[in-house]
Each structure stands twice: as C-alpha cells, then as structure tokens.
Image (tube, rainbow, N blue to C red):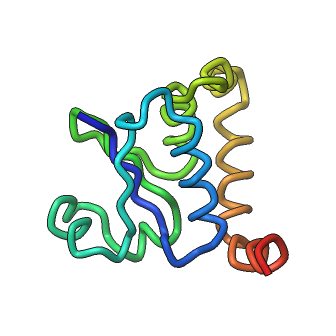
Amino acid sequence: MAVVLVYDADCPACRAAADWVRRNAVDPDTFEFLPCRSEETRSRFPAIAEAACLQAMHLVLRDGTILVGEQALPEILRRTRRYQWAAALFRLPGAGILSRSLYHGFARRRHRIAKRLFP
C-alpha cells in the first residue's frame, strides 16, 4: 500500500515538487498522488481540509497518520532512491525550526516563485 501525497495541483511549483517525488521514488508504487481539490481526496481523507491542503502538502502514511508541510519532508526523502540520507538531517538539533521556517516561507511565496520559474 502506497503513502498518499496530497498537494495543490493548481500550483506549478507544487506540481513540480510532486513530479520530483514521483521521479525519485524508490519504487513507482511507493506514492499515490492526489490533488487537494479532488472529490477522491475529500471522500477518502475528510480530516484534510481543503484550505489547509492549499497551505501545505499532506502525506498520509499507511497507518493513517497525516504529516503536514515540513513534517512530511523526512518521510518523503526516506522513500527516495538517492536522497534517503537527507532524511537524517531533520534529526539534527534545530532542524525542525529551520525546516518549518523555510517550508512556510516557500509555501507563502510559492505562486510568485512559480511565476518566475515556470513562466
């Protein structure tokens, strides 16, 4: 059973991130990808509010645990071919504060960033 990455499919930067995860996954069946605004997301994961999903990606683990934003990053990296080692960086002192700050800063500006990166 795959973990489910719920992301804003209307955001070019978010689509690019989901594509990166897809390309780097250990196995093609490691992840399932669902857009925030899909009916399937609403019916399968009613605990994920659309507004919250549009603010940050959500990763639903096999046991039903939902990781949001920067909390999902180490779990995503653990499931990649070449970047598993980077998941350990999130256990370093201060990493949580730094990753939260960077993730939320990017998330707030993602549409502006996407316009520059994906004109």
Question: Is residue 114 left or right of 48 when viewed as pictured?
Answer: right
Q: Is residue 76 above or below residue 45?
A: above
Q: Residue at x 23, y 34 (%)?
A: 1
Residue placed furthest toward the left? 43
> Quadrant of the rendered structure where residue 80 is?
top right
Q: Percent position (x, y) of residue 115?
A: 77, 80
Residue placed furthest toward the right? 116
> Quadrant of the rendered structure where residue 93 is?
top right
Question: Is residue 41 left or right of 109 when viewed as pictured?
Answer: left
Q: Is residue 1 above or below residue 106?
A: above
Q: Residue at x 59, y 64 (%)?
A: 14
Q: Is residue 61 above or below residue 44?
A: above
User: How many marks do you count on the picture?
Assistant: 0
Q: Residue at x 52, y 25 (%)?
A: 78
Q: Nearer the viewer, residue 53 or 6?
A: 6
Q: Percent position (x, y) of residue 88?
A: 63, 19
Q: Is residue 70 above or below residue 83?
A: below
Q: Residue at x 40, y 47 (%)?
A: 59
Q: Percent position (x, y) of residue 107?
A: 65, 65
Question: Is residue 103 left or right of 9 when viewed as pictured?
Answer: right
Q: Percent position (x, y) of residue 47?
A: 23, 61
The image quadrant where one finds the C terminus is bottom right
